[in-house]
Amino acid sequence: MNLFHQEPKVVRQMIREGKITSPTSGMCAGYAQGNLVVLPKEFAYDFLLFTQRNPKPCPVLEVSDVGSREFSITAKGSDIARDIPKYRVYRDGVMQGEYEDVSSFWRDDLVSFLLGCSFSFEAPMIEEGIEVRHITENCNVLMYITNIPCRPAGIFSGPVVVSMRPIPHEKVVKAVTVTERMPQVHGTPIHIGDPEYIGIRDIHHPDFGDPVTIKEGEIPVFWACGVTPQAVVMNVKPPFVITHAPGHMFITDMKNSQL
Amino acid sequence: MNLFHQEPKVVRQMIREGKITSPTSGMCAGYAQGNLVVLPKEFAYDFLLFTQRNPKPCPVLEVSDVGSREFSITAKGSDIARDIPKYRVYRDGVMQGEYEDVSSFWRDDLVSFLLGCSFSFEAPMIEEGIEVRHITENCNVLMYITNIPCRPAGIFSGPVVVSMRPIPHEKVVKAVTVTERMPQVHGTPIHIGDPEYIGIRDIHHPDFGDPVTIKEGEIPVFWACGVTPQAVVMNVKPPFVITHAPGHMFITDMKNSQL
């Protein structure tokens, strides 16, 4: 079965039934996939305010009602606790385990945040003729912790984490204008060129993800990254958090072109 | 003293000292002015979520820290309780009075929301050669309650309120593209043409504001309006709310071009 051209609700159902447990990259072409952060209500206001103050690293696609397991706006009929192939459960900031179904952990005081993911802007970049190196080299995007502080909100604070894509110098402007159209998935880059300006000492040693080839004539271009909100939540070590496992995203019914 | 070309912090200081008590239209050209809604913390999460779900009628420019009287991002050094020429104080949904200074009412549990205002997109419209009729006719913009529901959030719900500007048919597309650039001040229109489609029975009898001339060849164009969040808050009749008085806005240090 080719999942590339499949409808999101069909794929979500297959995930729910345990028929898909793999990373979601390449599934449901053209539809937005999102990062999941599930928090107890007592942390929800500060976290929502944090996203409002830091829209580039933390673009919110949807916030569930308290206790609800459905993203009713972006994925009607979805089950947040079962429609992701792999979840992580954290207690007091420590990962307790990875699970394919978190319904047994669900509580009435949980609020689910769905945050935009750079998958959504990589497809339009490729369509515009810009190679995305980590896709070509079939590895995870490079990510770095910068010296740029997020605007704090309540208990949440921390540095902006960025992803990096090496772009041929003659295509850098195009990379800016393509991603400018998509503010709900990090939007324009936050830095172009010398990594030292944003506190990155060694471009070849990312804090997360895998090193990729940077060719002659290519400029490193940095976008705010969805790892930022997860890192910020983990800093606070809330008693209970559920997230997606890396690469295992929530697939919405929203087209990337709607973002 | 010409306030049109004055710096926002100078004008805010004059307001704070009681030297300006008039509506702020025409002050600090090029700088964004905002709507104020101040609520007790217990209502802040639902209201912030409401704005997240309804960004066109409720574009948030800034949310203060709990108890703070400063909009530290958009207006460093400001005093929310004194820098607006006229406020309204509501108790249980009933207006208690209008005041030029609300510092005596301030409480440690208050959260202040600053919401984008269509003043910010009218200046660029005029620069692009689009007449703004209610400015020409020196009256308040027309506003209507529509049949379009906001997405509810917690205790907050209600219909979208729109403002209307009659636009010559050959300039309607320009009016869309000019406002598209400014998503933080309502962005693109939500309806163009026949008012009945959005539940408006009589275009000549707005629910708020003053009727204006609609000339032959002009199309009514409707934008989501900042009255929406105020109307939605008042529906709930919270025990205590402070807002700006109509036309008496908070002047920020942000240029409209940054929105």
Image (cartoon, coloured by chain):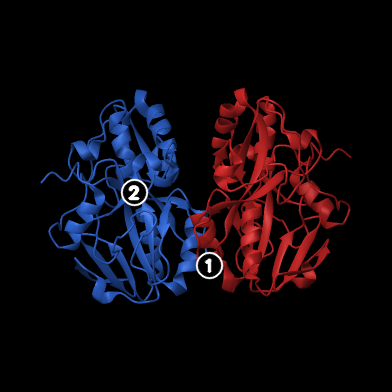
Chain colours: A red, B blue
Query: What amino acid is labelled 2 in the image?
Result: Cys
In depth, the one of B179 and A194 nearer the eye is A194
The residue that appears at 44% across and 51% down in the rendered structure is B147
Q: Is residue B221 left or right of residue B8?
A: right
Residue at 58% x, 48% y: name it. Answer: A199
**Location of residue A129 in the rendering, given as x and y in whole percent from the top left corner:** 68, 24
Q: Which residue is mark 2?
A: B117
| CA distance separating discs 1 and 2 | 24 Å
Quadrant of the rendering where the N terminus of chain A is positioned: top right
Q: Chain of mark 1?
A: A
Query: Which amino acid type corresponds to the residue marked 1 in the rendered image?
Result: Tyr
Q: Is residue B67 above or below residue A223?
A: below
Q: Which mark is residue B217?
A: none
| Lateral position of residue A190 relative to residue B134, left or right | right
Nearer-the-camera pick, B187 or A183: A183
Tell me residue A167's x, y (percent): 65, 30
